[in-house]
Amino acid sequence: MLHLRDVAKRYGAVPVIRNVTCTIHPGTVHLLLGDNGAGKTTLLRLMARLASPTAGTVEYDPPSRQCAFLGHAGFLYPGLTALENLRFWRDAQRLPKSDAHLLELLDRVGLAAHAHRRAAVFSRGMAQRLSLARVLLQQADILLLDEPGTGLDAASRTLLHDEVKQARDRGAAVVLITHDVAQDVRLADRVLLLRNRTLAYDGDVGGFQEAAA
Amino acid sequence: MIRLAKAMARKDLTLVLARGNGLAQALLLGLLLIFVFSLSREAGQPVTPQEAATVFWLSSAFCQVLVFNRLFALEETGEARLGLLLLPAPIQAVWLGKAIAGFCLLLLAQVCFLPAAVALLGQDLSGPLTEGALALLLVDLGLCAVGALLGALATGQGARESLLSVLFFPLQVPLLLAGIKLGAQTFGLSLPDGPGSWLRMALAFDGVFLGAGLLLFGFLYSGDA
């Protein structure tokens, strides 16, 4: 589990997040919603511990839990091929996966035919699928996905949904930022809604839909 | 930690060597420096071993700045730095990997600079070669340890090249001094006190820079994204 207690974040004098308290549960897909500038990405980065809170705490329980992060940039090296990118992240994390497994993964995201092409020549959608393969490779306990559907076509979005469901089924906690609420709410178990820089709703999907109606 | 460091170094060397991502500029600048200095003398006028060693290490120092600037820029394109910060390994592994890659690239450049210095500056390798090689390795080790540390400091800065140069050169002075003295000996100059004190100085600064890298890299590299 991941606990946030009274978390606040400000950049200089500008407050971005204030008084956020919530728990991210394993085996659950959390939809993180809010208007542009509501602080969703900042909150996700705080959860990933890529940023330190100005106040409050972010705790992993147990502390050894690992998270995978898919942000607006995909953590890819444009000069490396798709396979080399996955090899690097595999080796960096000491994952006991063979090249055959990496090729399977590329096949799963529809990039098998492009395994030996440099990421620099990939379209936005292809790069996003390669980033998704990097996240899936890790088999992390917590998946933090910041608008992962951006740039994906319909088939790739279906693939993304399948992978998110699989991650939930193996017990991973998933936090998903999206603007396509109608599509992605079907995936979700819980909703976190940011409004006025704080958490306005934290509950199940049914309650959120009732409140919205 | 070692595994991540190896993966980092392998990835960086692949990008720089196999994909032509930046070494050519560093090599050309170093060679140009040696060539231009060779023109500063009248024909037949000898270049002293100490002058030749100074030009050799000046080329190496400029090359090192460009190499580490390039190595740390590799993580900026796809925000891969953030991915590295999430890895379940000590972040010092990134410093070690960058230092190893930088060391290999600097040595490779010096393999080109040395014959250029010998040929263009009229030197011969008449001094003790074992001590010369040991000095080269010790000085390079310190330069790369501090290069990988300060490269992290300049990450994401608009004026990265200038910042790196300003930070690098004052810190490098003791190592460069040792390199110049020991290099001059390799080119045939006799050192009155022998090479021992210069080798010990290089070793001491290696220790300082390696320790500083291990202790400080995490603070410099893992600031708020």
Image (cartoon, coloured by chain):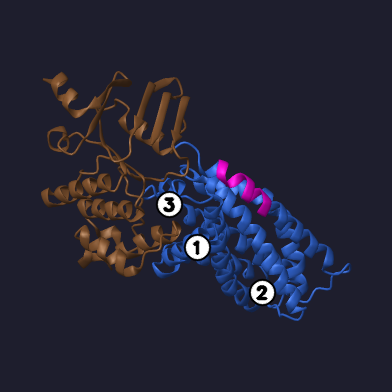
Chain colours: A brown, B blue
Q: Do tags 1 and 3 sit on the same chain?
A: yes
Q: Which residue is mark 3?
A: B75
The residue lying at 59 percent from left, 66 percent from top is B36
Label 2 close to label 3 by CB (< 8 Å): no
| Label 3: how many Cα within 10 Å (few below 14, some 14–19, many 20+) | many
Name the residue nearer the viewer: A22 or A131. Answer: A22
| Label 2: how many Cα within 10 Å (few below 14, some 14–19, many 20+) | many
The disc placed on residue B26 is none
Examine the structure image and report whether residue B75 is included in the region drawn in magenta.
no
The amino acid marked with disc number 1 is Ala
Pair 1/3: label in front: 1
The residue lying at 34 percent from left, 60 percent from top is A86
Label 1 close to label 2 by CB (< 8 Å): no
Tell me: residue B21, above or below residue A187. Answer: below
- The chain containing the residue under callout 1 comes to B
Examine the structure image and report whether residue B211 is included in the region drawn in magenta.
yes
Q: Do tags 2 and 3 sit on the same chain?
A: yes
Give the mark nearest the N terminus, 1 or 2.
1
Magenta residues, as a range? Answer: B210-219
Q: Quadrant of residue B190?
A: bottom right
The residue lying at 70 percent from left, 59 percent from top is B176
In the image, residue B186 lies at what x, y percent?
75, 75
Q: Could you give the CA–CA distance between mark 2 and mark 3, rounded to whole angstroms?
A: 38 Å
Inspect this view and state whether residue A32 appears.
Answer: yes
Dot 2: what SS? Answer: loop
Dot 3: what SS? Answer: loop
- The chain containing the residue under callout 2 comes to B
The amino acid marked with disc number 2 is Leu
The residue lying at 36 percent from left, 31 percent from top is A42
Q: Main secondary structure of the magenta part?
A: helix
Q: Which residue is mark 1?
A: B9
The disc placed on residue B121 is 2
